[in-house]
Every structure is written in structure tokens, then in C-alpha cells.
Image: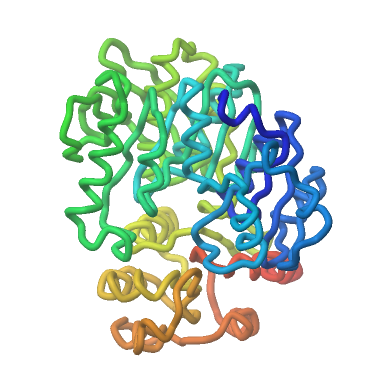
């Protein structure tokens, strides 16, 4: 990390982002002076402030920025921020300014990097690998795309020998990494605003896989054509590493794990869904190859609590169930709704979904419609625009999407209207799902459902 060692001050533009905040926490943990800007206060920025990181929410050139020495200050930004006076000032003054992905890549150059890529499953898999590393007391740092329920953070610091990194395909960011070990969980079409079509995104993942120097340290879900030699993993079918004999007992999932040379029976954990057993399978494959014994791994799997907003489930005294999930792609919606219908086939499901991005809604409209038809009742929120503008996607609205959904029990509403409409509905299970600001409904829903 010699290039980064020359800097004492690290200024983050867009510090409240999930990836940016993990980096900010890393430099803070290493004794650096960390400051930043973000547009909006959130729970995450409040927590960063509590940890001692100085954040401003005003786009002004204050005395702290003016006092920066450009020789000892590195500016890190996210491309999500398009226009900012602070960024213009730092650029004009000649500060070194790097994208988040570039800085993360520099960190991985000097660690034994375990990078997890995939259009689905990468957050759970990388968080689980980070958890197993910590439970095995491996000297590792973890940069995650979600809040671990075990760490209560998107970052964990237990040393610098290993780095566990969620490898983000957006904007081809993962090509900046230097992975020694890597996982590819899935290569479904997504981010077509960046890649253009399915062929290009598949090519991006093949480029990422080519960065791994050792065939035996690249793990790819069986059935994915990655274009080079690798180890495979699967559930309920043979592969280099696979799990089978899945069964459920009192809300716990049991499974057996197979390596090329042995079988280890009766892993148990609380995380539902076959897709999550897939994620566990590859995590176990990597940690066993790092020399961690299976007794340690069994204990670590059993106390893994999951990731906030990844099938976060609450069961109330009156029997009602509330599940909150980050799914924002049809494949992810199918997984979470499918898991609910598998475990609770007779219960009435109310789905509250906030589409994320006009472009994704447009590109996968028919698939979204088929996914959302699997609930019993649907509240469809307005599309969360993130970095996009409605004026560039004329006619792409939630009302337009709702017309494609062939179910009677559906209604389009704003975020502000949603909570009141939920309280009017009859349901056994409530699912709130999406990647925008639908998470602001979580606390009021919890308070209300606990009072019923």
C-alpha cells in the first residue's frame, strides 16, 4: 500500500455510500484523518460521525478544505456525484483525485485478496467469507456492500494480510482489483445502461475472472461459462465443491458439504433459501482451502446472522411475519418471493416493491411483472431514480409497469402514502423490497407491527 501511505488526510465525496463508507472506515481504522461530504444525512452517516469521522452536508469550501495540503491529502469520489463545487475546487487546486474503485484496487494489490463478484449473491457471500475469516482469526479487512448483522457494519478490521472485497460490476469497477482468490456467483444481465447487452456483461465477468492468477483459486457456480479453468460449486448436484441433503427443522437449515476428498455432515444455520446454501458452499470451499478446520467453520456458520436487508425476518406474537429485503432485480425477487412461498405456502403475502432505476425497470419490465404476480397483494412504489432523470426515460413509470402485472390486487403509490396503505391491508406476511429509500419504512413498520 506504498502509494496510499504517503497520505495522511482522506477526503471522501459521497462518503455515505455503502462502498465509500467502508473505505472511509478502513483508513480511519488505520489511523488516518478522514473527512467527507454527502448530500443527505442517513443512519449510516450518523454512525460514521459517532465513530469519529467528520462529515459535512453543505457544498461549501469551508476552512477544513482550504487547510488541506495537497501533498498529504487524497480525494476519493464516487461517479454517482455529477456536479459539486467542492470537487471543482479540489480539482482546480491540483489535488490527487481517485475513484473509489481505484483506491480499493490499490489496497488489494498489497493483500491476499478474496474478491466476490456476481449480479446476485455477492453481498451475502462476501459477508459470510469475512465472518468466517474473523471467526478463524485470520488477519483480514472486509469491504462489504451491506451491513453485516454480526459486525453491525459494512467494514471489519482484523489485520491487513487478507482483504475480503465485494467486487462491483457496475461501471466495470471490479477490473481495478487484484484478486488472489475469486468467486463468480452469477452473470445475469444487469446494468445494461453501462454494458449495453448480455454479451458485454458476460465478457466483463470473464475479464474479471482472468485477473485471478491460479485456476485452483477461482470458484464459479456450476453452469456459468467463464472462459478459463476453475473450480465449480453447486447445491444438490455434484461439483468440485457442493452441498446436498438440505432439510429444515424449527426454522434452521441443515446441509452436508462435499469437497473433492471428503464429506462433512450437518452444517446448520438460520439463513433460508437454496441460493444462500450456494453462497455458504463457496465460502466453505475457500476457507477450507485456506486451511481452516471444519469444526471452526461449523461453529462460524451456525452463528452467522446474515446481512441487514437481506431477508431480514421478524415473527410477531400475533403470528404475522415481516420480511425486509434489498432485491431489485427480477432474479432476486423470484428468489425471495419463492423462498417465502416455499416455507409459508398457505399464508397471504403482501409485497411492497420500489423499483430502482428507470433503465432497469425498462430493460426488465416483463420479468418484473412476472415476479410480482407471485404475491397475493401488491403495493408498487414510484421508481427510485438514483443517478437517473425521469426526463431521459419518458413514459417509464410505475403506472406503466403496473399495467403489465396480471393481478387484480395491485396499487401504485408514493413512498409517503405507503405506510398508511400497508395498515389498511389484510396480510399474514409483509415483504418490503427494493434498493432505494424504501428502507425508511422499516422502523415505523416494526413499531406498528409490535403494537398489534
Q: Which residue is found at the position 51% from the left and 37% from the top?
A: 104
Q: Which residue is found at the position 58% from the left and 45% from the top?
A: 96
Residue that lies at the very extreme toward the front in this rendered image: 93
Q: Is residue 302 above or below residue 139?
A: below
**How many numbered tags mark residues here?**
0
The x, y position of residue 299, in whole percent, is: 56, 22
Left or right: 448 in relation to 182: right
Left or right: 451 in relation to 320: right
- In the image, 51 versus 188, the foreground residue is 51
Q: If the image is split into quadrants, where does the N terminus sit?
A: top right
Q: If the image is split into quadrants, where does the C terminus sit?
A: bottom right
The x, y position of residue 319, in whole percent, is: 61, 62
Q: Is residue 207 above or below residue 92?
A: above
Tell me how the rendering is colored.
rainbow
Q: Which residue is found at the position 59% from the left and 80% from the top?
A: 415
The x, y position of residue 217, in whole percent, is: 32, 21
Instruction: Locate residue 439: give its quadrant.
Output: bottom right
Left or right: 342 in relation to 110: left
- In the image, 215 versus 401, the foreground residue is 215
Instruction: Locate residue 368: give its quadrant.
Output: bottom left
Evaluate whether residue 152 shows in this view: no
Evaluate whether residue 150 shows in this view: yes
The x, y position of residue 88, in whole percent, is: 61, 63
Left or right: 9 in relation to 339: right
Q: Which residue is found at the position 53% from the left and 39% from the top?
A: 103
Instruction: Locate residue 274: give its quadrant.
Output: top left
Amino acid at each position: 500500500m506504498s502509494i496510499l501511505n504517503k497520505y495522511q488526510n482522506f477526503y471522501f465525496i459521497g462518503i455515505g455510500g455503502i462502498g465509500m463508507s467502508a473505505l472511509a472506515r478502513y483508513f480511519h481504522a488505520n489511523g488516518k484523518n478522514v473527512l467527507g461530504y454527502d448530500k443527505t444525512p442517513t443512519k449510516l452517516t450518523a454512525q460514521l460521525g459517532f465513530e469519529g469521522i467528520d462529515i459535512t452536508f453543505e457544498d461549501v469550501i469551508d476552512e477544513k478544505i482550504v487547510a488541506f495540503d495537497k501533498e498529504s491529502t487524497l480525494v476519493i469520489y464516487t461517479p454517482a456525484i455529477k456536479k459539486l463545487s467542492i470537487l471543482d475546487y479540489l480539482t482546480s487546486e491540483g489535488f490527487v483525485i481517485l475513484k473509489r474503485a481505484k483506491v480499493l484496487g490499490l489496497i488489494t494489490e498489497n493483500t491476499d485478496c478474496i474478491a466476490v463478484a456476481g449480479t446476485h449473491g455477492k453481498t451475502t457471500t462476501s459477508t459470510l467469507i469475512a465472518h468466517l475469516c474473523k471467526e478463524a482469526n485470520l488477519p483480514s479487512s472486509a469491504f462489504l456492500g451491506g451491513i453485516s448483522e454480526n459486525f453491525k457494519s459494512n467494514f471489519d478490521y482484523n489485520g491487513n494480510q487478507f482483504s475480503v472485497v465485494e467486487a462491483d460490476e457496475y461501471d466495470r469497477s471490479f477490473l481495478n482489483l487484484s484478486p488472489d482468490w475469486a468467486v463468480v456467483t452469477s452473470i445475469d444481465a444487469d446494468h445494461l445502461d453501462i454494458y449495453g447487452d448480455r454479451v458485454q456483461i458476460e465478457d466483463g465477468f470473464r475479464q474479471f475472472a482472468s485477473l485471478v492468477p491460479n485456476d485452483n483459486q477461482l470458484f464459479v457456480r456450476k453452469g456459468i461459462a467463464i472462459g478459463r479453468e476453475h473450480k465449480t460449486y453447486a447445491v444438490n448436484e455434484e461439483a468440485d465443491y457442493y452441498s446436498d441433503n438440505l432439510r429444515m427443522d424449527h426454522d434452521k437449515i441443515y446441509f452436508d458439504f462435499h469437497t473433492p476428498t471428503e464429506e462433512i455432515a450437518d452444517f446448520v444455520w438460520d439463513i433460508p433459501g437454496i441460493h444462500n446454501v450456494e453462497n455458504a458452499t463457496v465460502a466453505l470451499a475457500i476457507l477450507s482451502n485456506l486451511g481452516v478446520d471444519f469444526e471452526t467453520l461449523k461453529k462460524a456458520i451456525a452463528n452467522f446472522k446474515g446481512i441487514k436487508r437481506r431477508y431480514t425476518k421478524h415473527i410477531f406474537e400475533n403470528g404475522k411475519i415481516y420480511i425486509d429485503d434489498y432485491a431489485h432485480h427480477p432474479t432476486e425477487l423470484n428468489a425471495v418471493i419463492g423462498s417465502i412461498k416455499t416455507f409459508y405456502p398457505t399464508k397471504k403475502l403482501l409485497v411492497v416493491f420500489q423499483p430502482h432505476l428507470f433503465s432497469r425497470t425498462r430493460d426488465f419490465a416483463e420479468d418484473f411483472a412476472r415476479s410480482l404476480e407471485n404475491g397475493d397483494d401488491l403495493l408498487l412504489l414510484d421508481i427510485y431514480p438514483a443517478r437517473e432523470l425521469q426526463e431521459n426515460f419518458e413514459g417509464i413509470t410505475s403506472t406503466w409497469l403496473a399495467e403489465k402485472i396480471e393481478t387484480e390486487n395491485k396499487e401504485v403509490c408514493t413512498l409517503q402514502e405507503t405506510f398508511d396503505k400497508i395498515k389498511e391491508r389484510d396480510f399474514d406476511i409483509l415483504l418490503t423490497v427494493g434498493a432505494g429509500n424504501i428502507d425508511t419504512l422499516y422502523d415505523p413498520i416494526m413499531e406498528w407491527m409490535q403494537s398489534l
